[in-house]
């Protein structure tokens, strides 16, 4: 029986050592899990901070896009006004060119008419001079 008690004692001692090893491993695993959870919590906090920064950046970006959209609309409106003014100036220049062309044609007609009238008058005067010379030669002494 002493032998059985010694065997039970050895077995109990061996089991106690196994349990001690299992408990040590469990404590190590729990500490490891706590450390991993702390790391995960730290990473979650960092991600939340990054998410808030990203939201802030997107909010500012959205505001900038809205401003660009507004300015683009204004530029579009101003472009329409400029195109209207350009058309008015173009129409005015075309009208002016037409008037200048008509004045040039009228000036040419007037010049041609005056030149023709002067030429006819000059021929008339030359004939009249010849006639006067003939008449005056009759009265010579």
Image (tube, grey):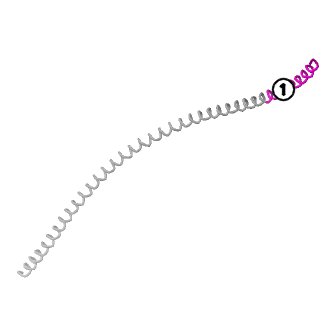
Q: What stretch is highlighted in magenta?
A: 112-141
Residue 56 position by quadrant: top left
Q: Is residue 58 left or right of residue 7?
A: right
Q: Where is residue 8 in the image (x, y as percent from the top left)?
A: 10, 77
Residue beneath the point at 84% across and 26% down: 122
- Establish if 38 lies above or below 141: below
Question: Which secondary structure type mostly characterizes the magenta part of the structure?
Answer: helix
Name the foreground residue: 36 vs 61.
61
Q: Position of residue 14 (x, y in %)?
A: 12, 76
Residue beneath the point at 10% across and 78% down: 10
Name the foreground residue: 12 vs 58.
58
Q: Position of residue 73 (x, y in %)?
A: 50, 38
Residue 19 position by quadrant: bottom left
Residue 105 position by quadrant: top right
Circle 1 residues within 10 Å: few <14, some 14–19, many ≥20: few
- Establish if 24 lies above or below 64: below
Q: Does the magenta stretch include residue 85?
A: no
- Establish if 33 lies above or below 97: below
Tell me the residue that label 1 is attached to: 122
Q: Is residue 61 left or right of residue 6?
A: right
From the image, which quarter does the C terminus lie in? top right
From the image, which quarter does the N terminus lie in? bottom left
Instruction: Check disc 1 and report its element: helix, strand or loop.
Output: helix
Q: Is residue 110 left or right of residue 125?
A: left
Give the residue at the far front of this rendering: 141
Give the residue at the far left of this rendering: 2
């Amino acid at each position: 029986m002493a032998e059985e008690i010694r065997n039970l004692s050895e077995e109990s001692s061996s089991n106690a050592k196994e349990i001690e090893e299992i408990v040590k491993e469990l404590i190590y695993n729990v500490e490891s899990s706590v450390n991993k959870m702390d790391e995960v919590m730290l990473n979650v906090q960092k991600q939340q901070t990054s998410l808030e920064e990203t939201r802030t950046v997107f909010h500012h970006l959205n505001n900038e896009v809205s401003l660009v959209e507004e300015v683009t609309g204004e530029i579009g409106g101003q472009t329409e006004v400029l195109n209207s003014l350009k058309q008015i100036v173009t129409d005015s220049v075309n009208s002016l060119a037409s008037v200048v062309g008509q004045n040039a044609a009228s000036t040419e007609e007037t010049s041609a008419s005056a030149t023709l009238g002067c030429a006819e008058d000059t021929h008339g005067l030359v004939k009249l001079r010849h006639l006067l010379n003939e008449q005056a030669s009759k009265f010579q002494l």
